[in-house]
Amino acid sequence: MNLTLRIWRQKSATAPGRFETYEVRDVLPDMSFLEMLDVLNERLIAEGREPVAFESDCREGICGACSLVINGIPHGGHKGTTACQLHMRHFRDGQTITIEPWRARAFPIIKDLIVDRSALDRIIQAGGFISVNTGSAPEANSILVPKDVAERAMDAAACIGCGACVAACKNASAMLFVAAKVSHLNLLPQGKPEKDRRVRNMVAQMDREGFGACTVTGSCEAVCPKEISLAFIAKMNRDYAAALLKGVPRRETATAA
Ligand code: FES
């Protein structure tokens, strides 16, 4: 199939950006979206032109690197699918496809389709861990975890931190990401000793990074490639309220960049 691509080009964070149009020919239906961009870049390089900068790593839907807004929807709008797992058979011959980076104040553009998502890393550094004494590994069955609790924790842990929830939200809120990361540890017995501090510190860091507030429109859940449920936001709000009632303070210093 032959396609017309409108791609956001921007040399650096401070340079002005604009859409540029490219024709791509002989795209195979079984190519992934990123392979189609590889074909375009090989041609641009052969012509001595600047290739389009975009991010990818695993190309298997597990790392969250492929942050592309495709025709206005993060990851292209196919349920439970990352851009790297999106195949060209979902597009029509002759179609025009618009490709943009994530757009949010907390995700400044680095170049073309690549944005700086280190704000999410700093939220994890603020509380997305458990503290353990070093030494030999504990006996596997010394802490029993009920099956339903383990499954809910695993559902939350499926978040790959791609940032699509932020890109889809009209407020650029990171609540679904933070809720998933807080919940997957707060649900488990190993995460409970730091439960209150974790939710206070991760939410505080989220606010410092400039993400917007959640107004529960559900766009985050709709585009999440791992189908993280909005119910985790409700759980995080309950955990946050409980920590407030106990008078648990939040860390006042920002987590280092
Ligand atoms: S490149 Fe890893 S999820 Fe897409």
Image: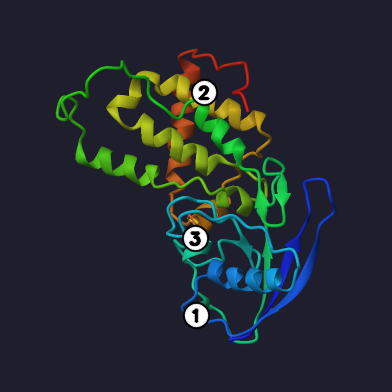
Label 3, on which residue? 82
Q: Amino acid at mark 2?
A: Arg
Name the residue rendered at 20%, 41% in the picture.
147
Label 2, on which residue? 200
Q: Is residue 85 visible?
A: yes
- Give the crowd class for mark 2: few <14, some 14-19, many >=20 residues within 10 Å: many
Whether pointer 1 and pointer 3 mark residues with C-beta atoms closer than 8 Å, the reply is no
Q: 252 or 96: nearer the eye? A: 96
Q: How far apart in space, not on screen, are marks 1 and 3 (Cα)?
A: 15 Å
Q: Amino acid at mark 3?
A: Thr
Give the quarter of the figure containing the N terminus.
Answer: bottom right
- Up-down: is 126 above or below 2? above
Label 1, on which residue? 89
**Total marks in image:** 3
> What percent of the width, then of the height, locates residue 10?
78, 56
- Kindly state the secondary structure of the residue where label 1 is placed: helix
- Up-down: is 109 above or below 4? above
Name the residue rendered at 56%, 16% in the picture.
251
- Kindly state the secondary structure of the residue where label 3 is placed: loop
- Up-down: is 94 above or below 151? below
Q: Could you tell which of marks 2 and 1 lies nearer the N-terminus?
A: 1
